[in-house]
Amino acid sequence: MTVSPRIAIDAMGGDIGPAVIVAGMARARRKDRGLAFDLFGDEALIAPELAKHRPLADAVTIHHSTDSIQASEKPSQAIRRAKTTSMGMAINAVKIGQAHAALSAGNTGALMSMAKLALRTMPGIDRPALAALLPTMAHDLVMLDLGANTECDAQNLVQFAVMGSAYSRTVLGVAKPRVKLLNIGTEELKGTGELKEAAALLREADYLPLRFEGFTEGDRLSRGDVDVVVTDGFSGNIALKTAEGTARFVTDLLRRAFTSSLRSKAGFALSKPALNLLKVHLDPNNHNGAVFLGLNGLVVKSHGSANIKGVANAIGVAASMVRNDITRRIGEDLDDFRAHAFADEAAE
């Protein structure tokens, strides 16, 4: 898709503030000069930060709003103020075609509810899913859902598999992604009824541009033997937070070990290049930017505590989604799935 992505950004979301958001925008645009931004939030706080990054001046339009969504705010409360908040205004910019994608580091539940209400789900999708890239020993994998839906039935999981595969094909370039369902074991007899039913449906859907390879367990997510991992939002969010916590534990443990004695400090000096590579691989900011798939428009969620590099990476995810026309590609796969499902029902 040969377009210059225009990203609508909530400058007030999360605990990072306009300073980090604007600096992240500047970093992203240094890498991609084709980017342009609509920035929503308190102009009195945004303008001084923009003044520090003059190359951004011709690429940013500020839309003033002093109203923002708080981290503890319930989605039902947030929806009522959607039209006046920086988050709601950013989503609306996508709805009216002013921007190609929206990005926020704010309240995930509020972002999900606002986006679903404003943009609606695509035909054939019951619920949107939050998808993100996770690092493995071999390559990045797509995992969804990561918290948008705490309970899912078999049809939801199949839809997630279709959307995740489209993500993998368009962004990671995997021609026919390997798909697995997250489960408590790899045996066919294990798991809930919903998982077993979803597995049966995916095994029959050999016409889809994906390879369903059964179940996987949480301890194998980092092995690199799968391209797309599908689960409900409850299990997915726990798995994601556990992986992030483990990464921080490993880096903190290494830091403590290498500063415990003079000999350890000498070993650290020799090992520093390898440890820097490990740090880069485990840093969540290098994989920041989760996408709500299944909506009639693109919405990206950044970590609330992301740093400048993390914000820039989330913007890069949004731009990549726009250029790869992910919404259209998901729609085409869903059309194929529905056509075969209707044909099978008619035959029965």
Image (tube, helix red, strand yellow):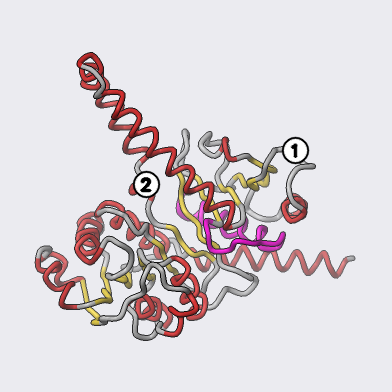
Task: Give how far across and how far down residue 336 sits, in percent.
Answer: 67, 64
Q: Amino acid at mark 2?
A: Pro
List the residue tagged with mark 2: 284
- Kindly report the distance in space between the C-alpha atoms of the residues bearing marks 2 and 1: 32 Å
- Magenta segment: does it hold 252? no
Task: Give how far across and how far down residue 207 sits, in percent.
Answer: 70, 55
- Quadrant in which the C terminus appears: bottom right
Question: In this orientation, does residue 35 appear?
Answer: yes
Cβ atoms under marks 2 and 1 closer than 8 Å: no
Secondary-structure class at tag 2: helix
- Quadrant in which the N terminus appears: bottom left
Q: Amino acid at mark 1?
A: Glu
List the residue tagged with mark 1: 187
Picture residue at 46% right of the left edge, 49% below the top = 133
Picture residue at 50% right of the left edge, 78% below the top = 76
Left or right of 329? Residue 208 is: right
> How many other residues sit within 10 Å of disc 1, few (<14), some (14-19) or many (≥20)?
few
Picture residue at 74% right of the left edge, 51% below the top = 192
Which disc, if any, is residue 67? none
Residue 94 in the image: above or below residue 139: below
Q: Which residues are magenta?
A: 146-172
Seen from the viewer's position, the closer of residues 331 and 226 is 226
Seen from the viewer's position, the closer of residues 161 and 265 is 265
Question: In this orientation, does residue 6 appear?
Answer: no
Picture residue at 62% right of the left edge, 39% below the top = 217
Task: Give how far across and how far down residue 254 sits, in percent.
Answer: 33, 28
